[in-house]
Image (spheres, rainbow, N blue to C red):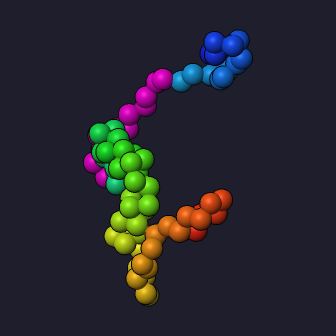
Amino acid sequence: MSQSAGGQIDTVMTETRLFPPSDEFASRARIGSMEAYQQLYDEAKSDPAAFWSKLAQEELHWFKPFETALEWNEPFAQW
C-alpha cells in the first residue's frame, strides 16, 4: 500500500505493467503506439478546449459549424 507522509492511505494498488498490442493490431489501430498516445495526451492536457475543438471539426459532420468549443462560466462548463 502507498501511504502519504501523514500516514494516510492514498491508494491500495499500484499497477505499472504495460500490455502492448500485437504488431498486427497496432498497425490497424487509430493510435498505433504509446508515443502517438502520449502526443495526443499532452496536446489534450495543455489546451483541452483547442484539442476537443480540433477533434470535433475533423471527425464529426456539422450541419452548422460551431464557433466556440467551450463556454466556461464557473461553476458551469458547456461544450
Q: Considering only vertical position in the picture, is 1 above or below 31?
A: above
Q: Is residue 21 magenta?
A: yes
Q: Residue at x 62, y 60 (%)?
A: 74
Q: Residue at x 31, y 45 (%)?
A: 39
What span is colored magenta in the figure? 16-29
Q: Quick one: which residue is furthest to the front in this view?
A: 74
Q: Residue at x 28, y 48 (%)?
A: 27
Q: Is residue 6 magenta?
A: no
Task: Give the position of the C terminus as an image quadrant.
Answer: bottom right
Quadrant of residue 23 in the image?
Answer: top left
Q: Quick one: which residue is furthest to the right in this view?
A: 8
Q: Position of residue 31 (x, y in %)?
A: 34, 49
Q: Residue at x 70, y 18 (%)?
A: 9
Indicate left or right for 16 with 31 as reference.
right
* Residue 78 appears in the picture as rendered: yes
Task: Give the position of the N terminus as an image quadrant.
Answer: top right
Quadrant of residue 7 in the image?
Answer: top right
* Residue 37 appears in the picture as rendered: no
Q: Position of residue 16 (x, y in %)?
A: 48, 23
Q: Which of the pair 3/76 is nearer the observer?
A: 76
Q: Position of residue 37 (x, y in %)?
A: 36, 44
